[in-house]
Image (cartoon, rainbow, N blue to C red):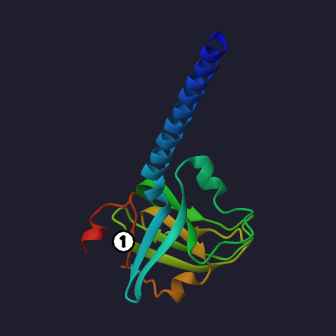
Amino acid sequence: MGVFARASGSLVGAIRALVLVATIFAASTVAGCASSGDNKLTLHTATGEYVFTVEVVDTPKSRADGLMFRQELAPDAGMLFDFKEERPVSFWMRNTFIPLDMIFVDAQGIVKTIHVNARPQDPTSIPSGVPVQFVLEIPGGRSVEIGLKPGDTMEHVRASTAAKEK
C-alpha cells in the first residue's frame, strides 16, 4: 500500500505540474494575441486596401536601427516608426541594403508625403517635409504599385480613429 500511495502521489504531482504548464502556456498565448494587432497595418488607396505585416519601432534605439543590414523585405512587409508625437523627421539609407519607400503619416493616419525608392547605402537626408508621427517603410516601388498618394490613409491601432471614419 505504501508503494501505491507514493505512486499515486507522484501521479497527482505530475498532473498538477502539467496543469500549471498548460495554464502558463494559455496565458502567454492570450497575452501574445492581445498585442498581435500592433503588427497589422492597412493602407487605403483609390485602388484598394493593402494589408502589411509590420514591425513597430518606437524607442530611440529601435528607430535608429530600423531596417539596417536587412537583405530582403517581403512585398507585404514593412517597418512602422512611431515617434509618439507629430514632428518633422528625417531619414537616411546608410547601412540599408534594400531600396525602400518611405511613407510619412500624421497622427490621424493621413499620408502626408511619400519618398519612392530610397537608394540603398545613400547617406543623403530624406526629410518628411511636414510634421508626422509615423514613417512606414515598405519595399521600394511598392507604394507606386498600390497607387498610394498623399491624402490616402493608413489604418493601424496606434493611429487615431479619425482616419478610420473617413
The spot of residue 84 in percent (x, y) is 43, 52
> Which quadrant of the structure image shows residue 11?
top right
Q: Image quadrant for the C terminus?
A: bottom left
- Report the amino acid beneath label 1: Ile
Farthest residue to the left: give it.
Answer: 165
Q: Dot 1: within a 10 Å radius of its alpha carbon, few (fewer than 14), some, or many (20 or more) residues?
A: many
Give the number of marks. 1
111 vs 9, nearest the viewer: 9
| Residue at 58% across, 48% down | 60
> Which quadrant of the structure image shows residue 17?
top right
The spot of residue 2 in percent (x, y) is 64, 10
| Residue at 33% across, 64% down | 108
Q: Is residue 8 above or below residue 105?
A: above
Q: Is residue 89 left or right of residue 112?
A: right
| Residue at 50% across, 69% down | 128
119 vs 1, nearest the viewer: 1
Q: Is residue 62 visible?
A: yes
> Which quadrant of the structure image shows residue 156?
bottom left
Q: Which residue is label 1 attached to? A: 110
The spot of residue 92 in percent (x, y) is 65, 66
71 vs 93, nearest the viewer: 71
Q: Is residue 129 visible?
A: no
The spot of residue 10 in percent (x, y) is 62, 21
